[in-house]
Amino acid sequence: MAQKRFEDEWGTGAREGYEDRGTFRPPRAPQKQPGSPLLRIMGAIAIVGVICWATYLVTAPGGSVAALQENHGPIAIIGLGVVASVLGKYLRG
């Protein structure tokens, strides 16, 4: 099998894989994430809190998955947490 010879625009046949930029590079300016950080944090807290609450309901003495079917609180709060997180991502604060 014949190897292809690399031919650049100047006819040198050399190929550079990187460019030496030196040791110092100025730091990038931090980019601010769009949206409302307060809504995102509140949504995340609600989601984590509901996961803990649902775990408690299922693992408590006498508790089972039926406890989640009887108690609709965790489902409503996790829904509010998801809505708050999504709104926090797209609404400006």
Image (tube, helix red, strand yellow):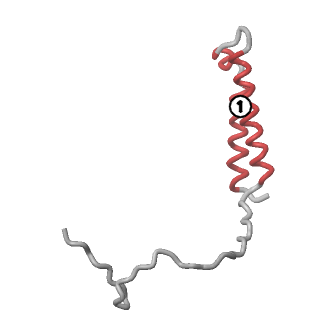
In the image, 57 versus 19, the foreground residue is 19
What secondary structure is found at the residue carrying circle 1?
helix
Residue depicted at 32% across the width and 83% down the height: 7
Judge by depth and name the residue closer to the eye, 58 or 67.
Answer: 58
Identify the image quadrant of residue 56. Answer: top right
23 horizontally vs 14: left or right: right
Image location of residue 28, percent across then percent down: 71, 71
Q: Residue at x 74, y 48 (%)?
A: 40
Is 88 located above or below residue 57 in the figure?
below
| Residue under label 1 | 76
Residue closer to the observer: 32 or 14? 14
Residue 76 position within the rendered picture, expressed as x and y whole percent measured from the top left: 71, 31
User: 18 left or right of 52?
Assistant: left
Please say if 15 is above or below 64: below
Q: Position of residue 34 (x, y in %)?
A: 71, 60
Quadrant of res 61:
top right
Q: Nearer the viewer, residue 80 or 58?
A: 58
Q: Residues within 10 Å of mark 1 (few under 14, many from 20)?
A: few
Q: Residue furthest top?
A: 62
Residue 70 position by quadrant: top right
> Quarter of the image containing the C terminus?
bottom right
Percent x, y of residue 60: 73, 14
Give amino acid for label 1: Ala
User: At 72% across and 39% down in the image, what residue appears?
Assistant: 81
Quarter of the picture containing the N terminus is bottom left
In the image: residue 13, left or right of residue 41: left
Q: Give the answer, above or below, for where 35 lies relative to 47.
A: below
